[in-house]
Amino acid sequence: MTTTSPNARALAALGHDARLSIFRLLVKAGEDGLRVSDIGAHLGFAPSTLAHHLSTLVDAGLVVQHKEGREVLNKADYPAMQRVLGFLTSECCTGVSLSPEGDAA
């Protein structure tokens, strides 16, 4: 059994246009976050569709939720976002060997 890394789960979750739109909206919202109803109003998603996509983002560790009264507040998890960005850019501009692996030089 293979275990999927947190970075792979995050990237897979962001690989869907709807989830990417939701995440970008939450990043724009900042630390205040948005209620589920606000996200739906901004993006025009049906509540069941929105719930499914938010659940996937929460499971991937990119969004945190907490209840405020009867509303659910959603926030981008900025440390998780920074980890994914760090993973993507960790070897930026370090160079790539053009010889195939195993070639004797």
Image (cartoon, grey):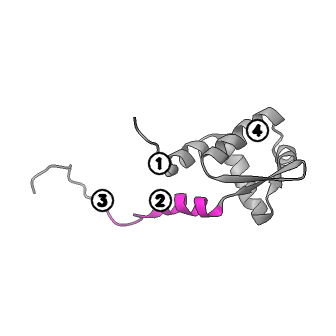
Q: Is residue 87 above or below residue 50?
A: below
Residue kind at label 1, given as amino acid type: Ser
**Would you name the residue on which mark 1 appears?**
5
Quadrant placement of the N terminus: top left
Q: Which percent across, then down, holds residue 59?
A: 62, 44
Q: Which residues are magenta?
A: 78-96
**Would you name the residue on which mark 2 appears?**
87
Q: Which percent across, then down, holds residue 46?
A: 83, 34
Q: Which percent across, then down, holds residue 22?
A: 73, 48
Judged by depth in the image, the label closer to the viewer, 4 or 2, is 4
Residue kind at label 3, given as amino acid type: Val
Label 4 vs 1, first from the N-terminus:
1
Position of 98 with respect to 74 (left or right) is: left
Residue kind at label 4, given as amino acid type: Ala
Look at 35% across and 66% down and name the residue there: 94
**Would you name the residue on which mark 4 appears?**
51
Marks 2 and 3 sit apart, C-alpha to C-alpha, by 17 Å
Marks 3 and 4 sit apart, C-alpha to C-alpha, by 42 Å
**Label 2 close to label 1 by CB (< 8 Å):** no
Position of 36 with respect to 96 (left or right) is: right
Instruction: Tell me the number on the disc at residue 96.
Output: 3
Q: Residues within 10 Å of mark 3 (few under 14, many from 20)?
A: few
